[in-house]
Every structure is written in structure tokens, then in C-alpha cells.
Image (cartoon, rainbow, N blue to C red):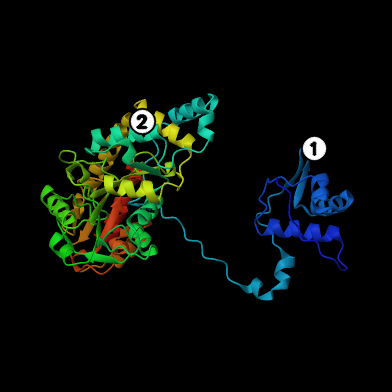
Amino acid sequence: MYDMTIKLLGGDKHLYEQIYEHIRHEIWEGRLLAGERLPSTRSMADYLQVARSTVAYAYDQLLSEGYIESRPYKGYFVCPIEGMVDMAERAKDPAQEAAPRETVVQKPLYDFSPHGIDMSAFPFSVWKRITREILSEDHQELFARGEAQGDYRLRETICRYLHSSRGVNCTAEQIIVGAGNDYLLMLLEKILGRHVCVAMENPTYMRTRRIFHSFAYPVVTVPSDASGMIVSKLEETDARVAYVMPSHQYPLGTVMPIGRRTELLKWADGGADRYLIEDDYDSEFRYRGKPIPSLQASDDHGKVIYIGTFSKAIAPAIRVSYMVLPERLLEKYNNECYFYSCTVSRIDQRILDEFIREGYFERHLNKMRKIYRSKHDLVLRELEPFAESFRISGENGGLHVLLHARGAVKEAELIARAAAADVRVYGISASCTEAVPKLEGTVLLGFGAVSEDDIRKGIAQLKGAWL
């Protein structure tokens, strides 16, 4: 426990009372947690410049009232106070006594979140072993400031992985490693400059749209069809940058065909300062057809900014994403943004690098593909009785499918009826910037984090609620 800053005032109130009341208040406010160790009486007395007996009197009072406990040879610790009622605090505000309690939202029994992933098969023992080996060896360099773009060794590994799995053509020098896409997009704003008009589809990934808005970027909405963003409509805008997810568009699950990709690349070639941002967030999971190469793989003129992440393939908490910059933008980064430090710990970078180099990442991916394919196929089988009332789309890849009601039922009604059956589904309107009539009555059904048994039970509940 660090020393505790307490503002001691003059007046009639004794110093020990002020110390007692401060600690008591901190416990009730949750700033001092159960089990947390308090400073010793000697340490606090020295820090506050008061007599040790003054602190001892305060601690004795807290002990007698059950706020703290003394453990022999260890010190003083905060006691659990769950269920206790602070009558003194309520007496100061009579209205508090009658104030209603906050409504606790009960977690649904079955949650089909499109963002969840399955962690049951993650090789924790391998990750622990790699971590232990790295920390037990003499790697002093890992505790020094690293390269701004991320450790070169990891960037080389990512470069080889991207080339073999996604067809990305790049060098390690073009890769920037960062803690999540949010950081990489913020860095990209410094590279592209201010007030850049960005084109996005509708619906789209709203988190990215909000990030662009936070940059004061004008964001224009471009209609899409079954092939993705309509380039003829994009030409009608003042956009300099188009944000797309060609391998698996979120939330629609659209896979952009080669013809539309070529059109987008031609649009980008039409202006010296035009670029495409390719968000390749979950391309590892595809269930039908051959693997789809990245858009960047077809880029011959340095117009695609490629962004990827390990959040879906490994775990969200890994917080390691990467960006591949075209040569022209890389030069600008080196001249103007070189001083931004990498936001990923060098130890975490080394662990991830070893995880990939030793083949564990590939084995984990293969295992997860089998798990997700099994869940995907189970979802489609369980949804067969829904065929007359719903149309299914987005089933070729990713970790969710879309259900489109064939009748006049609205999204809100579907969500409410599902909630009444203790099931949570997700409306597509949360990803829309404006209403899309053809998507009314559409919900997302994610299966990544749902067990197969819960998939069966949850969809059975939906059958009773919707059919």
C-alpha cells in the first residue's frame, strides 16, 4: 500500500478523528478495497508528520468498528463491508433513504453476441510456458524502449504470415504494430492529415465511424449492394479515403468480388491523394469456397492501407493490431510521426512472436476453424425451421449470421420477444447511420462465444418466441 494523502485541518476536531473519518469514507466510497493493506502506523505518521500514537488511535477506532483488521506480523487490512449500511452517511441526506435502488439488468441466459469469441480451446499452458521462458532468461533489452513501429522481429513474423495467408505484399519496414485498431487509426490521422473526407458503407462498423468523427473527419455514406460499396456512388462524393471490409463486411457479411475490388482500386488510382483502408478483421474464418486474398494483394500502385488484428484469431485481451502502409505514406510517417512510441509492451510482442514462430498460432487457428465451422453448421441446421419466416445471409464466413424477417415484423419486436424468452440478439440498426428499408426486421445471431449446447437451447427458445 502506498502512503495515504490526508488533508489535516486545524480547528476543534482531533487529528486522529480526521484520519479515522478519511479512511472510513475511502472504504465506503470503494477507493479502499476489501483485503487492501493500509500503511503501517509508523509509515503514516512519518508521511503525515504526526505522532505515531495519533495514527494508532485512528486505527484502533477503525478496528473496533470492524472497518479494518490486524493480521499478526503483516499489518492492517480493509475488511469486507458488503451488506453493511452506512447510517451516518444516509443521515446527512434524508432523501437518500427513500431513493430507489438502481435497477439491475439481468444477464440473459443465452447471449448471441456477434463480437464474442470462444476461449475454451486457447492453449493457455503454451502461452504461460513462453511467457515464463522469456521472463526467466536474461532479456534486458525487452525492458528498454523499443522501436516506434514495434520490434522488428515481430514485424518480420507478421510480414511472412500476411504474405502466406492473405497474399499481402509488404516488407517489415512497412508494418506498424499498435495496441488495437483505435491507436492505429489515430496514428493514421496524423499521417493522412486533417479534415480528410472518408467514405463508409451503410451499415458499417460504427466504432470506426465514431473514431473518424472524433478526428473531425467529414464522413460520407455510400450505398452498397450485394457486392459491396457502389463505386459509381463513391465517385459522386468528395471522399479522399474509402473504408472497406472486402473479405467479410461487418455487419452484412458480404464478400467483395474481384470485379468490385478492381473498381475500387481504379477509383483510388484516380487521385494522387486517394487511398483505401482495408480492415481485414476476421478473414481467418471462412466456411465456403476458397480463401479470399486481401485487397492489398491486388494493389500495384500503393493505394491500400491494410489493417489487421489478432483479437479475433487469438484473444481480445492480446490487444495487438498491425497496419501496413504504402511506401508513400511510410515516408510521411518516417518524417512526421516517428516520435510516437509503440503502445504494445515489448514483452507481449516477444511472447506473440514466439507463439507464431513456433507454430502454435497456426495450430490454434486450425483448431478454431474446426470449432467455429461446427458451430456455424449447427446454427444453420437449428435455423432450418425458420426458413418460411426468415431469410439467412452472411453465412459464408465470420462469427455471426443475419436473420431477415420475411413479414412486416420490426427489429425492435424481434429483440423484445427474444428477450422475453431470455435470449439476447442484436439488431442491425445499431450499425446503421440511416434507415435501410430492405434491412428492417433484421437481427444478428453471433455464435463465437456460445457453446453448442447453448446454441441448441437458445435457438429453441427463439423458435418459441418468433414462430
Q: Position of residue 421 (x, y in %)?
A: 36, 58
Q: Residue at x 51, y 31 (%)?
A: 141
Q: Residues within 10 Å of mark 1 (few under 14, many from 20)?
A: few
Looking at the rendered image, the quarter that the C terminus falls into is bottom left
Q: Position of residue 391 (x, y in %)?
A: 17, 56
Q: Residues within 10 Å of mark 2 (few under 14, many from 20)?
A: some
Q: Going from the N terminus, do you reach mark 1 or mark 2 first?
A: 1
Residue at the disc numbered 2: 356
Looking at the rendered image, the quarter that the N terminus falls into is top right
Q: Out of 98 and 292, give the one closest to the viewer.
A: 292
Q: Position of residue 67 (x, y in %)?
A: 75, 53
Residue 460 shows in the view: no
Which SS class for mark 2? helix
- Looking at numbered disc 2 in the image, what kind of residue is underneath it? Ile
Tally the numbered discs. Answer: 2
Which SS class for mark 1? loop
Q: Nearer the viewer, mark 1 or mark 2?
A: 2
Question: Outermost residue, left direction?
Answer: 259
Q: CA distance from mark 1 to mark 2?
A: 48 Å
Q: Along the horizontal axis of the image, is 207 left or right of 294?
A: right
Q: Residue at x 46, y 36 (%)?
A: 348
